[in-house]
Amino acid sequence: MAIVTKKKVKLCRFFDSVAPLQYFSHPMKKKTYSLYSVLFLVLLVLGPLMLVPTACVKEKVLPVITITGFPEIKSRTALCNAVVESDGGQEVLTRGICWWTQPGPAIDRDSTQNGAGLGAFTARMNGLVERTRYYVRGYVTSAAGTSYGTESSFTTLIGDNLPVVVTTVPFNINLTDAQSGGDVLSEGSGPVIVKGVCWKTTAGVTIADDTTIDGSGLGSFVSTMWGLALNTTYFVRAYATSQVGTGYGQELSFTTGTTTPTVVTTPVLNAASTTASGGGEVLSDGGVPVTERGVCWNTAGAPVYPTDSNRLSGSGLGVFSVSLTNLTPSTQYYARAFAVNSVGTGYGQQEEFVTQAASVPTVVIDSVGYNVGHHIIPCFGRVITDGGAPLTGKGFYLDTIAYASPALASGPVNPPGGPGPFQRGTFLYNVQNGIRGELNGRNLYAWAYAVNGVGVATSPTAIPVKTKVYDTDSNLYNWTTIGTQDWLTENLRTTRYCNGNNITQIAAQVSWAGAAGGAWSHYDNQAVNDTLYGKLYNGLAAADPRNVCPCGWRVPTDADWTTLESFVGGSIQAGGALKQTGTLQAGTSLWNAPNTGATNAQGFNGRPGGYRTNTITGGFVNVQLDAYWWSQTQPIGTPLDLYYRKATFNSATLERNPNNRLFGFSVRCMRPTRP
């Protein structure tokens, strides 16, 4: 409520309210004149002796303050909440409260100053007398003066004693709830306004933790604690709160109970003739850890673990899934999820499903390894299901074409067996179109198959098989297709020609320079270099018609090299395209830096194997710097020479030159690409 100071200008109020004045102008005749006429006459007489106001002064509106409560009352102190609601159009300079033991306290009595401006504030009153009634008003001072709010009052307490309460021993302890309570024996220095219990899982409970509210005043009460966790120890004590504060009873403890796990069963899906997919979710462990969980099933209903068929899937809470196996085709089944703890086994709801009729097996091929001999390839596959009928066979076969629905190849199969992985250690290459032959560097396709009483099933997809190339010594080589040519991606390492004849190994330089036939050596006569760079062959071996390369492959002609150069962009950049990337200094290659232009774009993997000279005083030169590869082509007019190609560490060019056949170079074999 606005409190207004009315400063009146008496003359102005008088002008506005006085009744018309009367006077007689003649002893026998009354005449009425207005006050203003009279005033005019007075002014004529008084003149400068009077100051006449020309306007009325407006009333000033003072700020508004309200006391909102006493949040704390003790014997000698108290707190008061107040709020300045309006400033009356004037800046609030000071605000606070004032109090006295008589009504109408003013700031000349006990008072506080609590800042300035609008808004709420809390003031503390000190130095009070016990059990005394005090009157309190809020005040606000502005340029318009000091205004007071509505008066409130309170009575101080006798002393500052907290309530006295005892805690009831917890009872009716269940899985997620329990009961306790207490008895307020004394209210202390003030009335108990709320009482109950408080609790948590660690000692030192206060009303800042979970609480109940169970009335007020003296006397006993019962409290129920809800939302407790299973198998958990809690601490609890009663409390009673007055305006002085909160008193607590003794702190007690109790532990909630345990039960079997709570679990739900998920619907059984993908029911085939002998398999299905099931699962469940453990929602609660019952207060103790879940040690096992899974699904059990039977054909009679209400399956139990571990008596009936079952499949386990881990432990603990959460979602899980299992495969139901060894089912009978065309049969009604009942399944339940289960979970086990130390209390017992909990089950989910029962789910029903019917298996399908028997069918052909389901089989997949997982992988096919490289050939490990002339006619040997390791194959790996799995029979996913036997289709509901016993398997009579399973195996693999190969072909040069990826048929959509391949026919079963003739020949032996693995021994009969049930579902699961199997490995065929050896496989006779027996393609469907009747071609029987070697596995030397072939692009093939492999399938797995399985047979039961219903029929034959093949894997839904074939796996491409790129067989390795093997030489007469049974060394295996990787290979790649570059344009219309197939090239080994490694230098040759054989010691025999394709027909099985030996190639002479020569270590001594004097013998090497005088060789009369094909010969080979390791660089520096160190066998460790065989793995890194392959062997060095003289030109007599490279041009020998018995073919130093694996059967079906050849030493490239000069024209073969030219075709390769053209495909990778010409001789100017062919050296870089054929070299391995990286450098010896960086630990990423055998090439010395800078290994100019190296991209290995076609996977040729050229390595710097160096060469061996043809003189008795010579030796081994330029390993890790240059690569030299023979062709089998003789230059016209120089029957002792052959063309060769050279890649070097500081150039991207692939050089073409003739050289004497008694030099030792690397051999890189090739063939025209096979259909």
Image (cartoon, helix red, strand yellow):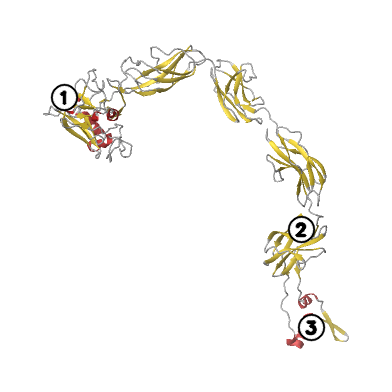
Furthest toward the right, the residue is 28
Element type where label 1 sits in the image: loop
Q: Quadrant of residue 221?
A: top right
Q: For residue 56, which numbered disc appears in the image? A: none
Q: Quadrant of residue 37?
A: bottom right
Q: For residue 515, which numbered disc appears in the image? A: 1
- Front position in the image: 107 or 149: 107
Element type where label 2 sits in the image: loop
The quarter of the image holding the C terminus is: top left
Badge 3, how many Cα within 10 Å: few under 14, some, many 20+?
few
| Residue type, label 1 | Ala
Badge 1, how many Cα within 10 Å: few under 14, some, many 20+?
some
Q: Is residue 322 above or below residue 111?
A: above
| Residue type, label 2 | Thr
Q: Is residue 216 above or below residue 337?
A: below
**Residue 378 visible in rendering:** yes
The quarter of the image holding the N terminus is: bottom right
